[in-house]
Image (tube, helix red, strand yellow):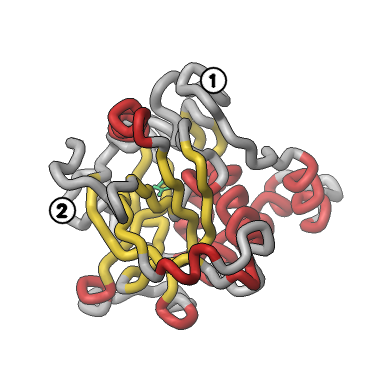
Amino acid sequence: MTSGETEASKDGEFWLFGYGSLIWKPPPHFDRRIPGWVTGYVRRFWQASQDHRGTPTAPGRVVTLISEDYWSTLRDRDPHPSPPDNKVWGVAYRIIPSRVDEVKTYLDIREINGYTIHYTPFHPASELHRPDHPGEEEERGPIRALVYIGTPDNDQFVGPQDPQELAAHIYRSEGPSGLNRDYLWGLERSLEELCPESGDEHVRDLAERVRRIAAREEGGGVEERDVRREEHEGHHEFRRRESVDEVEETEKMGED
Ligand code: SIN
């Protein structure tokens, strides 16, 4: 994985789009975080994870973006074929100019397992969804943003999977950053928190399947609603990190 030659910029600014763990585990050194979407992609749990939510011998599954053109050539057995309005929701971060190189190095390590750098127009959500900054970003229009994508030619790309088998795989996977199911549920929750329309049916459906598996496997009267409640109680609240030295979970410089 290499840093791009071109800056993700608008007026010399550097913006990063996150559609997976970057939504709830932000990069260091940002001064703006804006919910919004990109188009032309489908989000899928089709990327193997050997370093965060699985191991080299038992890789877990994390999300990547599939270009709609390529995706339309595949036999995707997922019951929720494309995102509503063709929007893939996530967040964009504006990185403090003096820290851009440092953040790129951090990201290159964090996203090393098959992700490469791409650039895409990011559409900030309307002020309706961002009462903290009314109007401001809407006037700016799309922002060119850097995004990490696991493309179909990378070694960790898995491709279409049966949703129930994928859910079972996620349920049993675990890596240095924690349980694979916590990544899935964390993504579901952080998407739901962005705005009323930002949910993703692929993510929601998988999360529901894993909740049912957990309720069954963990048996002994564990109800689905208990799984959901425990998961909420354990919710890692979004917070801004000011330094790359401030690490979470078990990661060093490779948080997922
Ligand atoms: C991202 O969050 O944008 C990249 C995928 C991931 O690390 O989950």
Q: Nearer the viewer, residue 167 or 253?
A: 253
Q: Nearer the viewer, residue 146 or 227?
A: 146
Percent coordinates x, y for residue 46 in the rendering: 35, 56
Q: Amino acid at mark 2?
A: Asp
Q: Is residue 96 visible?
A: yes
Percent coordinates x, y for residue 21 in the rendering: 49, 45
At numbered mark 2, what does the secondary structure look like: helix, strand or loop? loop
| Badge 1: residue crowd in 10 Å (few <14, some 14–19, many ≥20) | few
| Residue 153 disc label | 2
| Badge 2: residue crowd in 10 Å (few <14, some 14–19, many ≥20) | few
Locate the N terminus and report the quarter of the image it occupies.
top left
Residue ID at (50%, 22%)? 243
Percent coordinates x, y for residue 4 in the rendering: 18, 43
Q: Amino acid at mark 1?
A: Glu
Up/down of 148 relative to 188, above or below: above
Q: Which residue is mark 1?
A: 246
